[in-house]
Amino acid sequence: MTDAATRAQALLHDHRDAIDRLDAILVYTLAERFKQTQAVGRLKAEHNLPPSDPAREAMQMARLEQLSIAADLDPVLAKKFLTFIISEVIRHHEKLQK
């Protein structure tokens, strides 16, 4: 292996280590987010509130779009991600209301 290939392998390893750390941060952050949304779902169920809040969801989408632009992340990707999360949260909230 050439010196350049060896350096490239080392850089690749470093990038992958960083990605692994970021994946762990994402998983733990997502878990914490769902703990909070579960608490919201229980509160909604206790007080007979609807499982979804379209006005809040629209606000969150707009907020996420601005955050993604500031973070130099594709807003379409960010919206797809939040749409998935919101659909899962609503599904959990609906289960709690049964």
Image (spheres, grey):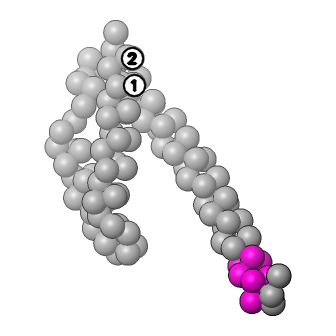
Q: Is residue 8 left or right of residue 42?
A: right
Instruction: Find residue 32 and report its horizontal and vertical position in percent.
Output: 54, 43
Query: Is the Cβ of the residue at disc 1 closer than 8 Å to that at disc 2?
Result: yes
Q: Height in image: 33 above or below 48?
A: below
**On the picture, is 62 further left or further right than 72?**
left
**Residue 38 belongs to the span the image colors magenta:** no
Name the residue carrying label 2: 96
Residue segment shown in magenta? 4-11
Q: Is residue 87 above or below residue 92?
A: below
Q: How would you rate the neighbour count of disc 1 (Cα within 10 Å): few for under 14, some for 14-19, many for 20 or more? A: some
Q: Pick out the residue farthest to the top.
A: 98
Report the residue at 32% width, 30% height from top: 90
Task: Count up the numbered dots.
Answer: 2
Under circle 1, the secondary element is: helix
**Residue 22 picture location, percent across and down:** 61, 60
**Badge 2: residue crowd in 10 Å (few <14, some 14–19, many ≥20):** some
Q: Amino acid at mark 2?
A: Leu
Residue under pointer 1:
92
Per the image, label 2 sits on a secondary structure element best described as helix
